[in-house]
């Protein structure tokens, strides 16, 4: 059952980091090598410019690399965009899709996110599909409905041997230091789990549902022990390997 799913601790560096930041991948590798036991899968999603070099430094399976977005098409006249195949070719195994910063800043709709997720699956990447309500939507009592619609409309159908990750990130908790109560996190993750099971059956039972929004070493233990929370999507606290490792250790 979902309680025994191996957690995924994912770092989203957003638009942060140049070559010097690759030292954090080296440091993370060291910390993982020194640890007696790592009870989670680890993913770092740096800017696309660093994916290839980060994958070379990560060497092996301990740290997976991911992109932060991809185009829905395989190739073509899309200046500035990156395809899922390109990310995979650079060494990525995952790609974050539909982050609220892209939904808000680039007007991405759930239908577009779904098309991107289909492209990611076709390229052999695991899509990490983000959903989450705004503060107003929560205050007005629409959090479940908004997140439910995003889950339903953003997720593609997928083959039984493929994998999809959902990340619940309340928009108002991102980069603010604010987090929902543990009861609210548990309620929303239960809601998402139900939608996944209703639609995908066993694959929905085993799909990982990450929580994201102001996760740090000091609150990770409690959040990660919440039912149906199968990992974390971490922004600010993933930029420094030591902080990120603090969250990994909490898993
Ligand atoms: P913070 O951890 O900085 O709140 O960011 C969360 C996030 O947006 C991860 O995708």
Image (spheres, rainbow, N blue to C red):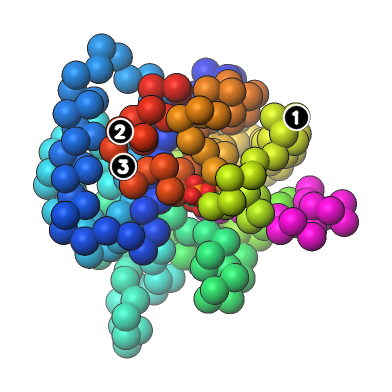
Quadrant in the picture for the C terminus: top left
Report the residue marked by disc 1.
183
Secondary structure found at label 1: helix
Q: From the viewer's perspective, is the residue at label 1 or at label 3 nearer?
A: 3
Secondary structure found at label 3: loop
In screen coordinates, is 66 left or right of 175?
left
Label 1 to label 3: alpha-carbon separation: 29 Å
Report the residue marked by disc 3.
240
The residue depicted at 71 percent of the width and 58 percent of the height is 134
Q: Is residue 5 above or below residue 73?
A: above
10 Å crowding of disc 1: few (<14), some (14-19), many (20+): few
Q: From the viewer's perspective, is the residue at label 1 or at label 2 nearer?
A: 2
Task: Tell which circle, 1 or 2, labels the residue nearer the N-terminal end.
Answer: 1
Q: Is residue 162 visible?
A: no
| Quarter assignment of residue 100 | bottom right
Outermost residue to the top:
36
Report the span colored magenta: 122-144
Q: Report x, y in % for residue 203.
A: 55, 35
Check contact, mark 3 vs mark 2: CB within 8 A.
yes
In screen coordinates, is 182 left or right of 119?
right
Task: Tell which circle, 1 or 3, labels the residue nearer the N-terminal end.
Answer: 1
Q: Is residue 141 visible?
A: yes
Report the residue marked by disc 2.
242
10 Å crowding of disc 3: few (<14), some (14-19), many (20+): some
Label 3 to label 2: alpha-carbon separation: 6 Å
């Amino acid at each position: 059952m979902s309680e025994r799913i191996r957690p995924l601790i994912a770092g989203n560096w957003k638009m942060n980091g140049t070559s010097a930041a690759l030292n954090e991948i080296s440091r993370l590798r060291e910390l993982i090598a020194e640890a007696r036991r790592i009870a989670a899968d680890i993913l770092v999603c740096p800017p696309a410019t660093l994916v290839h070099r980060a994958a070379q430094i990560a060497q092996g399976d301990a740290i997976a690399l991911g992109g932060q977005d991809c185009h829905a098409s395989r190739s073509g006249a899309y200046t500035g965009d990156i395809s899922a195949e390109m990310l995979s070719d650079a060494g990525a195994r995952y790609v974050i899709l539909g982050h609220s910063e892209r939904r808000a800043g680039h007007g991405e709709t759930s239908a577009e996110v779904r098309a991107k997720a289909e492209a990611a699956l076709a390229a052999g990447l695991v899509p990490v599909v983000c959903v989450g309500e705004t503060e107003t939507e929560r205050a007005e009592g629409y959090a479940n409905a908004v997140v439910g619609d995003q889950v339903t409309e953003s997720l593609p159908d997928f083959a039984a041997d493929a994998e999809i990750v959902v990340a619940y990130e309340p928009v108002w908790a991102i980069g603010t230091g604010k987090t929902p109560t543990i009861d609210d996190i548990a309620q929303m993750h239960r809601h998402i789990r139900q939608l996944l099971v209703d639609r995908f059956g066993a694959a929905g039972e085993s799909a990982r549902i990450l929580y994201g929004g102001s996760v740090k070493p000091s609150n990770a233990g409690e959040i990660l022990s919440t039912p149906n929370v199968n990992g974390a999507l971490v922004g600010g606290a993933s930029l420094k390997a030591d902080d990120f490792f603090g969250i990994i250790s909490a898993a």
